[in-house]
Structure formats: C-alpha cells, structure tokens
Image: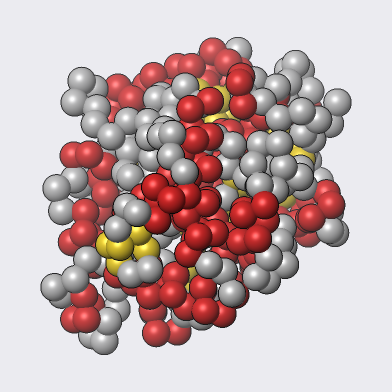
Amino acid sequence: MSNRDVAVIGVGYTTFQALTPDVNWKEMMFEAASEAYEDAGLDPRKDVDSFITCAEDFWEGFSIFDEFTPDQLGAVLRPMHTVSGDGLQGLASAYMLIRSGLCDIVAVEAHSKISELLTFEGVVKLSFDPVYEAPLFETAHPYAAAGLEMRSYLEASGTTEEQCAAVAAQHKRNAFSNPIAGFAARIETDDVLDSGYLFDPLKKLEIAPRADGSIVIVLASGDVARRYAKPVYLEGIGWSSDSPWIASRGSDAPYAARAAEQAYRKASIANPQKEIDFAEVDDQFAFKTLQHLEALGLARPGEAGHLAEEGALGRNGHLPVNVSGGSLGCGHLMEASGLAKALEVTLQLRGEAGKRQLSNARVGVAQSWRGVPHGTGAVAVFSRRD
C-alpha cells in the first residue's frame, strides 16, 4: 500500500426510528446519500470513483444486494460492490481502495430496514452451528446465547449487574442530546435492574432495540481532503473474525482486541488509554460496552465496570463513551451500527455534535460487532489534525 492519507469529507444520515412505514429503504438511502454529497460539495456521478454498500442478504430479503443500490447512490454504471458485513468493514474496503491508489474518492453506505423483517430470531438462528448448537436454541431465543456470555464475563471479570445496568441507563440518557436517536429515556440504574430478566442475567433494558436508518460517509485521499475545511482523518482501521461457535467462546472479546491491535498499529497508537480521547463502542447489550472497552485496551481487565459506576465514562468523565446514546439509546441499526459509531466520532471531531459536543477531543475510536453468535468486528481510529 502507498502512504496516502485517508479522510472523511462528507457525511449524511437519516433519523433512527423503530418504525419507518412512510419510506422504503431506497428513499432512506437516497436521503442520506444526497446529504453526504452536499456536505462534501461533490457530484457523485462525476467525482466519486467507487461506491460500497454494506448489507447482509438475509436481512434484506434479496441476493446480490448491490444490484438494488446504484440508483439512489448516484452510482449507475459506476464501480460498486457490497460488503456483506458491518459498516466499519465497508470503511476498511474504502480505506484500502484509497490507500492503494486505485481511487481518490469512495462513498460508503450502510442502512437498516429491520422493521420489515418478521422473522428476526429465525434469521439469527441460521448463524448458529447447524449440527451441535442450533438444536440447543430450537425452542429458545438466540439472545439466550448473549445471556450465557454475559454470565461468563461477569464471573471472569468481577463486573456486577449493577455496573452493567449503569451503562444502559447512561446511554439512554445520553440519547436525549442526540436529535436522531430514537430510544432516549430518563432512567436510572435501578430502573434497568427492575426491568426484569429476559435472558438471565441480561435484562430487558440492557438490550438495544432494533431501528431503521441509513448513513453515508464519503472518504477521500489526503490530497483531495485538504481542499475541504473540516477533514477528519481515518488514521487506522482493523477487522477480525473470531469463531462463530459458542462453545469455543471465552469471557473476553478477542475479535475486538485483534481489530484494535491492527488499527492502533496503523494509527501509531502506543498507549490507547492516554492517546484516545473518547470512544463509540458496540453496545447491543450493555455488558458488551464494558467487555469491548477492555478488549480495546481503554480499560484494564475487570476495570470498565468500576469506571462506569464512578461516572468516568460519562460525557464529563475522563473517557467519554457512547455520548451519542449508542445502540441502546439510538437503536440497533444492524449492519449500519458500525457506521453510526463512525458518524458520531466524525461529528465530534468536526465540532458538529451540538448539545453533546465534547471539548478538546482530537482522537476518537469507533468499534463494531456483528452480534450473536458472531465473533466478527472492526475498529477505526479517527483524528483531527488542525
């Protein structure tokens, strides 16, 4: 690869809502794409070299999904492909296209129209090992696997249920400062603890509700990005796939640790606790926030829960985490979840986060996880260089 810089020069997005009966997925994508191109000040038909959409055919109800996306992205008769994975994995593809010199400008899209899927649990079960593990969940919800993982994490790390509940309450409250978040709530730790076990020890309010929405991020080479007023540099990115077998899982998140190691190496991050100012991490389940922070090296093993309890992960703490509201407050956007994290980091570094704006934030990290039962995720490090 060359040593070309890669930077975000435009972002566009819809609101995140539980139900969107008034628009179809093409209209959502068009809205986000139009906003992103206007933000970047470019014409997709002339200026964008390649387009990427992040989609899993099982969620969409279509095969070869990129056949359905060129019109609304301005990519007709242009290079385009689908990444069957999370939005941060799509960013990784764009990063490589630009770093290699193949492209100067790439648009990455990810979305969710999960409200139209009537068989969510059934689709998730298709990811389980069909011989040894799927039969165990034949009559159980697949999130029971998350409950098992949470129990393992709590016992190994010494984290408490109260600390996990504090995370859920904080993220729900954070969402009030985010105008596109769909699930803000003025709740406290006790409200989460009282919400009832769904998959012991996982409680109802510790599970991110599913949401619809679309995000488009435009990336460019450093030479192009320097023409723009507020480029946010993608300093490093990494991704990793762990075993999909539940039986081989431990209490940690090795996929996140491996992805972080790659991203930090590319970004020249030697001490993440000192060099990273804030983080947007995957929180499909509240305990995952803490597990992921430890895997990213932003907290020592067993320490993240104490940081949450002490308020250190709040907007005014020394390591603000998910000030956007995260998936718990914004909604779980399926394959767009990682791009939502990257969006928030970008807005923060551009100084465009409104009421939730952090002061003096220069380096942020976004992290994604594809959910039960996957061990697949990605990590991206962003910075502003002014």
For the image shown, how many numbered marks are present on the structure? 0
Taking depth in this image into account, of 191 and 109 the one nearest to the observer is 191
Q: Nearer the viewer, residue 102 or 60?
A: 60
Q: Nearer the viewer, residue 334 or 303?
A: 303
Is any atom of residue 331 visible in this view? yes
- Could you tell me residue 270's position as x and y percent? 85, 59
Residue 318, image quadrant: top right
Indicate the quadrant where residue 364 lies: top right
Q: Position of residue 226 (x, y in %)?
A: 79, 23
Figure check: 5 above or below 78:
below
Above or below for 314 versus 130:
above
- In the image, taking residue 239 as reference, residue 319 lies left or right, namely right
> Residue 356's quadrant in the figure?
top right
What residue is drawn where x is 32% and y is 30%? 17
Residue at 84%, 58% (x, y): give it: 271
Is residue 36 positioned above or below 163 on the image?
above
